[in-house]
Amino acid sequence: MNIDWAALGSVFGVSLVATVALVGLFTLGIVGLSKSAAPAEGATATAGNGSAAVARAGAYVCFALCLGAVSYGIYMIVA
């Protein structure tokens, strides 16, 4: 039995990069949602209203990209 070490290393490398990218995107989404959360006690509600909307939109984009990557992976497995 011969093992193609170059192919195995290539699959490992691509899997590692894809996993880190997907976890990073999901983390950015969670951070974006936490930035758009209600202000802390004693803080003014008007401070940063525009940036909260941008953070929430960015978080939704990150989650959509994660969903797209997972859907593409499932498509590749099934096809």
Image (cartoon, rainbow, N blue to C red):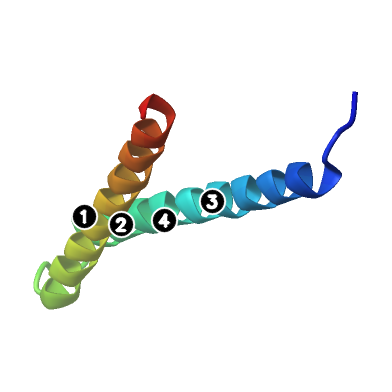
x, y percent for residue 23: 49, 48
Which residue shows up at 17% across the image and 63% down it? 57
In the picture provided, is 53 more to the left or to the right than 12? left
The image quarter containing residue 32 is bottom left
Q: Which mark is residue 12?
A: none
Q: Is residue 47 visible?
A: no
Q: Which mark is residue 18?
A: 3
Q: Amino acid at mark 2?
A: Cys
Mark 3–mark 2 Cα distance, whole angstroms, equals 14 Å
Query: Which residue was labeled with disc 4?
Result: 25
Which of disc 1 and disc 4 is earlier in sequence? 4
* 59 versus 79 height, above or below: below
Q: Amino acid at mark 1?
A: Tyr
x, y percent for residue 47: 16, 76
Which structural element holds mark 3?
Answer: helix
Task: Confirm or deny contact between disc 2 and disc 4 (CB under 8 A).
Answer: yes
Which of disc 4 and disc 2 is earlier in sequence? 4
x, y percent for residue 79: 36, 29
Which of disc 3 and disc 4 is earlier in sequence? 3
Which residue ends up furthest to the right in the rendered image?
1
Q: Amino acid at mark 4?
A: Leu
Task: Confirm or deny contact between disc 2 and disc 1 (CB under 8 A).
Answer: yes
Query: Which residue was labeled with disc 2?
Result: 62
Task: Confirm or deny contact between disc 3 and disc 1 (CB under 8 A).
Answer: no
Nearest to the eye among marks 3 and 2: give it.
3
Q: Is residue 2 visible?
A: yes
Which structural element holds mark 1?
Answer: helix
x, y percent for residue 1: 90, 23
Query: Which residue was labeled with disc 1?
Result: 60
Q: Residues within 10 Å of mark 3 (few under 14, many from 20)?
A: few
* 78 versus 13 height, above or below: above
